[in-house]
Structure formats: C-alpha cells, structure tokens
Image (cartoon, grey):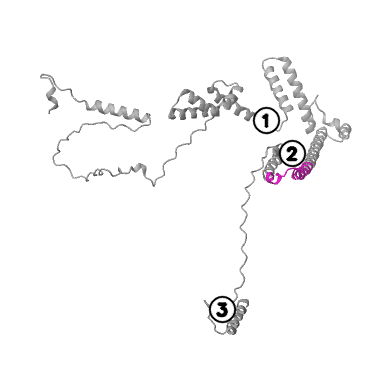
Amino acid sequence: MDPNDNIQPGTDPAPVDATADALAALDAGIASADEGQPDPAPAAEPVDPAPAADPAPADPAPQDPPAGDPPPADPAADPEVPPTEPAAPPAADAETEKEIGELGLKEKSAERFRALAADVKELAPIRDALKQAGIEDISKLPDLIQRSQVGEDMVKMVMDTGANPEQYGQALDYLGLIAKASKGDVASAEKAYSVMEQELRVLATMLGKEVPGVHDPLAAHPDLRAEVEAGDLPKARAVEIAGQRAKSAVTTQAQQREQEQSQAQQQAEQGGIAWLQEFDADARARDPDYLAKRPALNEAVAHIRATLHPSQWPQATALAYARIQAPAAAAPAAPAAPALPRPGPLRPTGPRPAMAPAFDDPMKALDFGIEQANNAAA
C-alpha cells in the first residue's frame, strides 16, 4: 500500500527537513554524553546517491564486518599505547563531602566542587597573611613586592657601608638638618654645623691636620712645639711630623684592635666547640635515637657555625636538635633459614644383592649373614 494514498487530494506531503533532523540528533547526543549515557543513534533515511560518470579509480572501501564479529579496533585505543593517566582527584574532607551531599551534586559537579574547595583551603593562609599586611585588594600586591625589594636594597646598602645602627641614625639626622637648613632654618643650620665641627675635629686628630680653631696638631707634641718656638724647626715641617706620628698611632691602634678581636673570636670559637662536644656526649647518653639524628644535626651545626657568632651556637643548636625527627625504624629482617648439615663422605659399601639367596646349609647361611653385617659396618 502506498503511504500517500491517505493524503487528501489537493494537498502536498510535508517535506522532510534533513538538516533539522541532524541537529536534533546532535543535541540528543550531547545531552546523552552529559548524562554519562551512550549517544542515541539518529535514524536517518537512506538516500540513493546519483551515479557519477567515469569515477576515478580509488582504493576498495573497507567491508563492513559480518554480523556477530567484534567491531574494528579504534586506533586511539591501541592497547600497546598506554593511555594517559587522569589527574588524581583532590583529597576531600568530611565537610566537603557533606556539602556535596546536601547540594545533591552529580559526579562531575562533585569533582569540580572538591577541586574548588581544595583551592580555597590552600589559598586561605596566603589570603590571611595578605590581610595582616594590610592588603585587601590583590592589585596592590605588586606594589608591596616592589616596596619590599626597595627595603631589602636599602638594608644591603647600609650593611655594605659597615656603619652600625647608631652611626646610620646620626647620618640620617644630619641629612635632615641639612635639608631644613637649605630652606632657611637657622636653628637646623647651627645644629648641622656643630655636628660637622665634631666630625672635623675627629678626622683632623686622626690625620694630624691643622685646622685653626678646631685642632692644633702640635698641642700633643711638646718637643715639636719647642723646636718651632726656638726656630730650629719650621712650623710646616713640625706639622708634617705631627701628622705622620698621628697616622702611625692610628694604624697601630687599628692593628691592636684587630688582633684583640681575632683573639676574642678564637676564644669564643673554642668555647663554642667545647659546648658542642659536651652537648654531643650528653645527647648520646640521653637519647637512644641520637645516632640516627646525628647526620641531620651535623648539617644544621655546619650552617650555624658558618652564619652565627659562637655565643649564639648553644641556643641555635638546641633549637635545631629539637626540630629533628628520628627516622622510622627499618622492619626487622626475616630470620635466615637454618643451615643444613654438611653431608659426610659416602662409604663404599659395594653393591648389595637385591635378594638374599636361599641356603640349604644353616652354617652357610650364618656365614653369609656375618659377611653382610661386616660389609654394612665397613
């Protein structure tokens, strides 16, 4: 029966929209994949292709597998190529799993929720540290890093000068006074002049320079002054000699001070080494795991000795030792199998008869038994 027989006369049959059917099948496949189910096979009407004139020779098309045979293997699923292992899901805690259950999330959404929860917990300490530093907006973080770098550079510059904190503070105060004096502050100018005069006096005394009203190098050398007053020595020459004496005295004092510091350093190191030896003996006696901790302690002590003054060795060593954890004890080895006794030498007894012969004479039977016994004892 022709299906068009039921169509009323004068009406055209509804056209089949192949594009709409294909899009509907694609939407159904995507929805099915999201739900974790296989894609439904779209039902497509067979279309007879128009015959092409003089087709070019081509490779024979692959034949469909017969019914009942397994489908051809997917090249992407080659068993010889190991598949890429999926990333391990983030470890979830009880609180996260409870929220997942309350929200009724499915597997994919639950995995995403676990990942987000893990990221939040990992970044929480960083967020708290930024808030404590006064950073509420993440865009201000580069400014904080830049200020920190500038601060480190400033500290390095100060340390490179070799000045102590007091000297550095005085230098900053002096710069402040000079800045105010340049703006017409007379009081700041007087203070700056007083500071400069004191520095000039110290330097003039060190070098033996003559600065009128500030330093007279001949005041500390009465012999030179007497020769100058008697006219036996020109004043310029006397000032030059006074300067040489002053410089020599400064050099000698610096050498003595350096020698004293070296001796004090050596004594401090000897005291620190003696303390480390006492600590080693005491810890060895008290801690049964000391020998296992000793390699880590040696590494920590080497760093301490290279970076800290010997007076700080005891405290730093005690703190480092308290942080060291004893390594896990190794599992006891399985007992060895008992050794088998070594076999002794074989005694050549010679071949024995498989069956004793029958004797009619009892004496012959007795002689045969005695002979067998002697052979066995040999």
Q: Quadrant of the N terminus?
A: top left
Q: Secondary structure at mark 2?
A: helix
Picture quadrant where residue 175 is located: top right
- The answer to whether residue 145 shows anywhere in this view is no
Quadrant of the image occupied by residue 178? top right
Q: Residues within 10 Å of mark 2 (few under 14, many from 20)?
A: many
In the rendered structure, which amino acid carries the disc numbered 1?
Val
Question: How far from the left and from the top, in percent, is residue 338?
Answer: 62, 59
Camera-nearest residue between 273 and 176: 273
Badge 3 amino acid: Gly
**271 within the magenta span:** yes
- Left or right: 347, with 297 as reference point: left
Identify the image quadrant of residue 237. Answer: top right
Residue sitting at x 70%, y 14%? 185
Q: Relative to residue 17, is residue 80 drawn left or right?
A: right
Q: Callout 1: few (<14), some (14-19), or many (20+) C-alpha neighbours within 10 Å?
A: some
Q: Callout 3: helix, strand or loop? A: loop
Mark 3 nearby-residue class (10 Å; few <14, some 14–19, many ≥20): few
Above or below — where is 137 with respect to 218? above
Percent position of residue 21, x then y: 25, 27
As drawn, 98 above or below 261: above
Residue at x 66% of width, y 15% of height: 183
Give the distance between the C-alpha atoms of the residues marked 1 and 3, in whole angstroms: 103 Å
Q: Which SS class for mark 1?
A: helix
Span highlighted in magenta in the image: 270-294
Q: Which residue is mark 2?
A: 313
Residue in the foreground of this view, choosing between 49 and 161: 49
Badge 2 or badge 1: first in the primary sequence: 1
Q: Which residue is mark 3?
A: 350
Label 1: which residue? 158
First in sequence: mark 3 or mark 2?
A: 2
Compare residues 286 and 187 and report the one nearer the observer.
Answer: 286
